[in-house]
């Protein structure tokens, strides 16, 4: 009897338990549905905000990407005697950029460069995870190489300006750049644009400044050095900070091994090379203006004034101005006018006429 009475109670208990489980499942489903709905709403709002900001993105031109904007003045022998503009840069075309340098840049800056279309969700997710876990080794951030190019071309690089709006516009322009230009062109623009420290822009100019050579004559270790410098040009300067420069260079070499463009043996051999090997003792790239300025300052002022009168912007138009100026003759004339080697003024005065003694002096003249 007691067993028969217990059966209804047992069934009631089971029904109650089942009902509670159903309610719990119902609540879980509702919560999941709400979260899924919020997720999609967040995506829609984010997409709307992205396109709203993208509409206000500035125009980006090939001249802005190319950045060969300084005015160069040549003498009668086609030697550069002056540069005018904010950036000291020698532009190099893609077919003249060594493949090893391209591989080094891609390996350290954007391993998936040839796979994405301007923005890389996998890269963004990886960078976010690395930042969250604190496992990032400083190899790569969330921005693709194309996004970095856009930032250098039309936006401020100040951290204070890295807002959501700016990031959205940067991503939008990166997508547009990828649609218009090939990967080879984008890499060319980037290699010529980056700041390399000591007032030098572009890796071709940096090769001349740091090694006194063109890119085609550099070693694997030197390519890795240049490829790693844009992250912090001052900090990784091999002249003034060789210890940190070596660390960065070796990080690039490790990235190249990981990207399977060089072998471990090649990396080890390059790492054994001192970062000071091949460094130039003089830096003619940085001294063009200061060396020649005193000889041709007045002449240049007239040249720039004439260009400005004709509607040219000598700071941003990337002009190449060829003149018939002979630098050797100009320096000779300057020496004549500004030293006592050629011109001396001799004043001979009669004792009866003047109360002071006679002397010969050299007069300094400015032309």
Image (tube, rainbow, N blue to C red):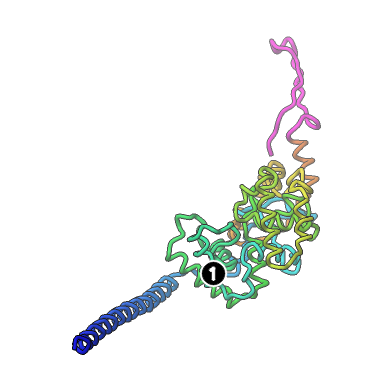
In the rendered image of this protein, does residue 8 appear above or below residue 323?
A: below
Report whether 129 appears left or right of 361: left
Q: Is residue 68 visible?
A: no
Residue 308, by quadrant, is bottom right
In the rendered image of this protein, does residue 189 appear above or below residue 32?
A: above
Chain part drawn in magenta: 338-367
| Image quarter in which the N terminus is found | bottom left
Query: x, y (%) of residue 354?
Result: 70, 12
Q: Main secondary structure of the magenta part?
A: loop
Query: x, y (%) of residue 109?
Result: 62, 63
Dot 1: within a 10 Å radius of its alpha carbon, few (fewer than 14), some, or many (20 or more) residues?
some
The residue carrying mark 1 is: 60
| Image quarter in which the C terminus is found | top right
Residue 190 lies in the magenta-colored region: no
Q: Tally the numbered discs.
A: 1
Q: Is residue 236 visible?
A: yes
Report whether 212 appears left or right of 252: right
Residue 363 lies in the magenta-colored region: yes
**Residue sitting at 72 percent across and 28 percent down?**
363
**Residue sitting at 65 percent across and 55 percent down?**
201
In the rendered image of this protein, does residue 104 appear above or below residue 183?
A: above
Q: Secondary structure at mark 1?
A: loop
Q: Nearer the viewer, residue 274 or 157?
A: 274
Q: Nearer the viewer, residue 266 or 301?
A: 266
């Amino acid at each position: 009897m007691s067993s028969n009475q217990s059966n209804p109670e047992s069934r009631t208990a089971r029904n109650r338990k089942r009902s509670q489980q159903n309610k719990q499942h119902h609540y879980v489903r509702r919560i999941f549905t709400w979260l899924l709905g919020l997720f999609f709403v967040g995506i829609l709002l984010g997409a709307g905000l992205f396109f709203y900001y993208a509409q206000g993105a500035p125009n980006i031109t090939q001249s802005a990407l190319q950045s060969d904007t300084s005015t160069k003045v040549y003498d009668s022998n086609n030697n550069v005697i002056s540069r005018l503009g904010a950036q000291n840069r020698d532009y190099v075309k893609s077919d003249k950029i060594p493949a090893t340098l391209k591989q080094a840049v891609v390996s350290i800056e954007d391993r998936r460069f040839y796979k994405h279309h301007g923005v890389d969700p996998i890269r963004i997710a990886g960078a976010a995870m690395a930042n969250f876990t604190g496992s990032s080794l400083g190899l790569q951030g969330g921005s693709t190489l194309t996004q970095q190019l856009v930032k250098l071309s039309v936006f401020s690089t100040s951290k204070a300006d890295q807002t959501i709006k700016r990031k959205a516009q940067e991503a939008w322009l990166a997508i547009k750049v990828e649609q218009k230009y090939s990967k080879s062109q984008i890499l060319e623009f980037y290699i010529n644009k980056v700041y390399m420290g000591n007032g030098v822009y572009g890796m071709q100019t940096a090769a001349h400044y740091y090694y006194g050579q063109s890119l085609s004559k550099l070693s694997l270790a030197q390519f890795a050095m240049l490829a790693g410098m844009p992250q912090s040009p001052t900090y990784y300067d091999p002249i003034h900070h060789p210890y940190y420069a070596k660390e960065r260079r070796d990080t690039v070499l490790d990235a190249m091994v990981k990207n399977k463009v060089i072998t471990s043996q090649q990396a080890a051999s390059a790492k054994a090379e001192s970062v000071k090997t091949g460094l130039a003792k003089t830096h003619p790239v940085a001294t063009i203006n200061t060396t020649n300025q005193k000889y041709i300052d007045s002449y240049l002022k007239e040249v720039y004034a004439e260009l400005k009168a004709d509607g040219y912007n000598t700071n941003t138009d990337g002009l190449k101005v060829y003149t018939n100026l002979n630098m050797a003759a100009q320096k000779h004339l300057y020496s004549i006018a500004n030293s006592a080697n050629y011109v001396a003024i001799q004043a001979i005065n009669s004792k009866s006429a003047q109360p002071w003694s006679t002397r010969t002096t050299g007069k300094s003249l400015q032309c």
